[in-house]
Image (tube, rainbow, N blue to C red):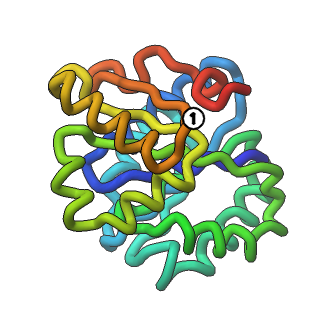
Amino acid sequence: MQLIVISGFLGSGKTTAMLSFARELAAEGRKVAIIVNEIGAIGIDNVLLKQIGANVWEILGGCICCSLAGELGTTLSRLAADFAPEIVLLEPSGASHPDTIKSVLRYAQGASVSATKWLAVIDPLRLEELVYVLQPLMESQVRTADAVIITKRDVATMQQLDAARNWALGLQPGLACFVADMKNPVNALSLKEVFDA
């Protein structure tokens, strides 16, 4: 099964992008599962995700990059055995550090993960503030990414969108950057287009 990790800070649009991709995959008849990690003890995003009929697995009450690291491997193994999805969409908590998740995934490779792709979601409205406060985390999310989606095109200024794109390309020249609306999350982008596959 292929794993697609969708990272980004809280409120960047990760869940919206994941919903859009899950709908696309379902429409293609692909078998997809979703793993959502929330630090709180109660899941919030799962209600939205289950509305589209997705197979949703939650890892709650901590972060998969630290206190719940072992849960990710266990969940992936159970998914492979019980559901055998073609694609797993993973939404880590907004505070998860990609480098640590990569280490956890290396440990969990026995869970039938054939390939892993990384998508970073950037909020251009809050980018300057988030980079100021969380620079190592924000930079790591982009440096790890195979592609970036800059959200909120319908409410951001052209200067904010350009600044987000230039910031991402400054960290990883040649990175595939896409821009999306809040109402049309991936602007009709397919996963094939995003990952050039």
Question: Which residue appears at 46% of the width and 50% of the height?
Answer: 171
| In front of the other: 51 or 70 | 70
The secondary structure type at the circle numbered 1 is: loop
Q: Amino acid at mark 1?
A: Gly
Is residue 162 rendered to the left or right of residue 3?
left
User: In terms of image quadrants, where is residue 174?
Assistant: top right
- Residue 182: quadrant of the picture: top left
Compared with residue 87, is residue 160 higher up or lower down, i.e. above or below?
above
In which quadrant of the rendered view does residue 100 lie? bottom right
Q: Position of residue 172 (x, y in %)?
A: 52, 46
The residue at the point 68 percent across, 68 percent down is 105
Asked whether residue 74 appears in the rendered view, the answer is yes
- Is 129 in front, or is 37? 129
Residue furthest bottom in the image: 67
Quarter that holds the C terminus:
top right
At which x and y percent is residue 143? 52, 54
- The answer to whether 52 is drawn above or below residue 171 in the figure is above
Total marks shown come to: 1
Residue drawn at point x = 63 percent, y = 67 percent: 102
Please tell me which residue is depicted at 25% across the width and 48% down the height of the picture: 11
Q: x, y (%) of residue 124?
A: 24, 38
Does residue 116 appear to the left or right of 48 in the view shown? right
Say whether residue 85 is left or right of residue 157.
Answer: right
Q: Residues within 10 Å of mark 1 (few under 14, many from 20)?
A: few
Q: Horizontal placement of 99 versus 162: left or right?
A: right
Q: Give the labeled residue for mark 1.
A: 174
Q: Give the image location of residue 188, x and y in percent.
A: 47, 14
